[in-house]
Image (cartoon, rainbow, N blue to C red):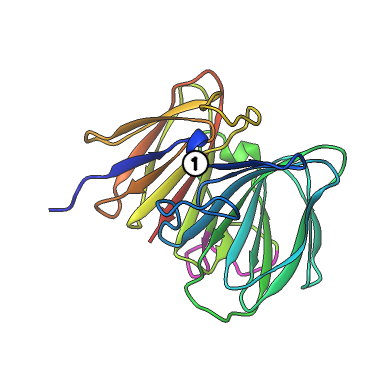
């Protein structure tokens, strides 16, 4: 008999956290100086860093290989430059994905006079030694308002276009689909998961906070016994049980919540 869907919380204040003045960052998984053997990898998902970078500062040129690296911009402007010749200013609603493949170098910096708040996410590719590629997509707040939008999906999935810019999900070389929503007060959505695992993250939109979660609040639940309340910065590992099983996300707080859900093999 297939087991029921199970949630395991990953609380905001338990994440890796560093304040470098120019960079305020949280690490869901082991990264840099933060190492925790219980939080290394989940399916193909390797990194979820929630970063705030001060104006006119950022990550200088550095190299990557054999990772799918994508940025989800929450606020401010992010300047991206890379060894493939791409130079771009990314803004709220933009998703930028670099398929590092055999190797790229890039820099990411706050553009303009305001802090940039973004999530940098890494996943492991299914196939190694692929040529590097670069993609951008834009998803408006209106598109995400009280609806799930598929913002990243496998290259071979339905509706995914292998174009540098275009409509539909950003193509990724991993068995990973990422959904986003901005869920209003008292609203709820169901989210079926086709993979064996999932992960949910509530974005810290109310401001930097390295203590217990504040701001928006949601409750996730199944038709069985599973139920969990999450605030901004909180997340949860999801063990799906039966493929196609659904869970509900309900906004129980006093403001809109911006939420990411990963569907993972």
Where residue 93 appears, as percent x and y from the top left, is: 67, 44
Instruction: Identify the magenta region.
Output: 153-164
Q: Which residue is mark 1?
A: 201
Where residue 70 appears, as percent x and y from the top left, is: 62, 57
Considering the numbered disc 1 on the image, is that residue within a helix, a strand or a loop? strand
Which SS type dominates the magenta stretch? loop
In this rendered view, identify the residue nearer to me: 44 or 61: 61
Q: Against 198, is 165 above or below?
A: below
Relative side of 210 to 111, left or right: left
Relative side of 191 to 204, left or right: left
The single residue placed furthest to the top in the displayed view is 254
Is residue 91 highlighted in magenta?
no
Q: Against 90, is 165 above or below?
A: below
Is residue 157 highlighted in magenta?
yes
- Image quarter in which the C terminus is found: bottom left
The single residue placed furthest to the left in the displayed view is 1
Where residue 236 appears, as percent x and y from the top left, is: 41, 41
Q: What's the residue at 54%, 24% (across, down)?
A: 214
In this rendered view, identify the residue nearer to me: 125 or 166: 125
Q: What's the residue at 80%, 57% (across, down)?
A: 88
In this rendered view, identify the residue nearer to me: 260 or 15: 15
- Tag count: 1
Image quadrant in which you'd find residue 101 = bottom right
Image quadrant in which you'd find residue 82 = bottom right
């Amino acid at each position: 008999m297939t087991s029921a869907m199970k949630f395991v919380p990953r609380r905001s204040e338990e994440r890796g956290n560093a304040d470098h003045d120019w960079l305020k960052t949280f690490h869901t998984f082991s990264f840099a100086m933060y190492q925790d053997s219980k939080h290394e990898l989940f399916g193909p998902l390797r990194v979820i860093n929630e970063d705030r970078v001060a104006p006119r500062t950022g990550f200088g040129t550095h190299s990557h290989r054999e990772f799918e690296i994508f940025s989800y911009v929450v606020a401010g402007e992010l300047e991206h430059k890379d060894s493939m010749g791409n130079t771009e200013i990314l803004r709220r609603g933009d998703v930028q994905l670099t398929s590092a493949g055999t190797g790229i170098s890039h820099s990411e910096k706050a553009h303009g006079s305001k802090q940039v708040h973004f999530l940098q996410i890494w996943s492991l590719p299914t196939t190694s030694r692929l040529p590097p590629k670069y993609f951008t997509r834009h998803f408006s707040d209106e598109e995400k308002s009280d609806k799930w939008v598929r913002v990243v999906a496998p290259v071979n999935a339905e509706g995914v276009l292998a174009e540098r810019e275009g409509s539909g999900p950003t193509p990724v070389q991993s068995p990973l689909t990422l959904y986003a929503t901005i869920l209003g007060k008292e609203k709820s959505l169901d989210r079926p998961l086709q993979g064996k695992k999932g992960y949910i993250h509530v974005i810290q939109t109310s401001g930097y906070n390295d203590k217990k979660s504040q701001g928006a609040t949601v409750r996730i639940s199944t038709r069985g016994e599973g139920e969990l309340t999450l605030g901004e910065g909180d997340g949860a590992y999801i063990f799906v049980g039966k493929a196609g099983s659904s869970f509900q996300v309900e906004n129980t707080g006093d403001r809109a919540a911006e939420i990411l859900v990963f569907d993972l093999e």
